[in-house]
Amino acid sequence: MKRICLILICLAAVFGCNAQTEKNDDVIESIMSRTSVRSYTDQTIQRKDLEKIVRAGMSAPTAVNKQPWAFVVIDDKSVMKRLAEQLKNASMLQNAAAAIVVCGDLSLALTGENQEYWIQDCSAATENILLAAHGMGYGAVWCGIYPNKERMKVLYSELSLPENVIPLNIIPIGVPDRKNTPKDKWKPERLHWNKW
Ligand SMILES: Cc1cc2nc3c(=O)[nH]c(=O)nc-3n(C[C@H](O)[C@H](O)[C@H](O)COP(=O)(O)O)c2cc1C
């Protein structure tokens, strides 16, 4: 009986370990295979999928758990066309199925010198959005808005953003129209152990 118990414990340990490694491998594989996607088919994206992607954004960590953000999802083609015409850095909006504007909301942010943590918080949400879109088979790209005043002005005007809200970026999303290969960015010389 003792021997059977021992065998069962060993088996559980071995299979438990494997399951954990596989789980982690899934996440690593998604992170490593993500790349910016700027060209899409004309397929649309259902709102339930867009909401799921924003949920992933809202799952990001934030300083003092402030969650100082707001997300504007655009799936109206006429709005995307107007934005594409005015934002040269985001001209791929022209053929995207949808776009998400990640905004910092200063009325929800920390105050004083900690206020600017909103940028890191919203950047974490942005990366979650990019990874969620990728994991769901869509392609997306982070197009920077803040701190470029000209680009910010376009979004304030086209989306009627209130003054306390700052658009950090706009993320066009669609079904990729080709295979996109991720860049290999591994540079061992950038890694330091324990001290510089
Ligand atoms: C802060 C930030 C701003 C960016 N702005 C733009 C942009 O305006 N237009 C664009 O096409 N890509 C933009 N990108 C995407 C980068 O060009 C892209 O992430 C980079 O070339 C690395 O490629 P990868 O995303 O495929 O790994 C931006 C990325 C970041 C993080």
Image (cartoon, rainbow, N blue to C red):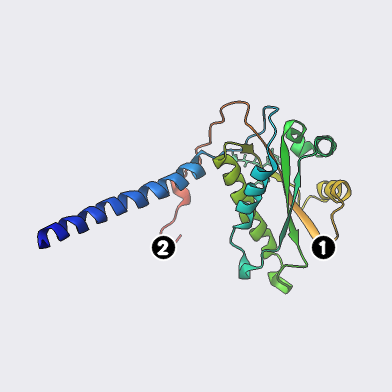
Instruction: Indicate the position of residue 172 as horizontal and vertical percent values.
Output: 70, 39
Q: Quadrant of the N terminus?
A: bottom left
**Between disc 2 and disc 1, whose residue precedes?**
1
For image coordinates 59% across by 57% down, the residue present is 59
Task: Characterize the local packing of mark 2: few (<14), some (14-19) or many (20 or more) Cα atoms within 10 angstroms.
Answer: few
Q: How many marks?
A: 2
Which residue is at 73% across, 73% downward? 111
Residue 48 placement: quadrant: top right
Quadrant of picture, ligand 1: top right
Q: Against 182, is 19 above or below?
A: below
Can you tell which mark lies on residue 164? 1
Identify the amino acid type marked 1: Asn
Q: Residue at x 43, y 62 (%)?
A: 195
| Marks 2,1: beta carbons within 8 A | no
Q: Quadrant of residue 62?
A: bottom right
- For label 2, the SS is loop
> What x and y, as percent, mark residue 46?
68, 39
Q: Residue drawn 61% across and 45% down?
A: 130
Where is residue 140? Give x, y as percent: 64, 39
Q: Is residue 111 above or below residue 25?
A: below
Residue under numbered circle 2 = 194
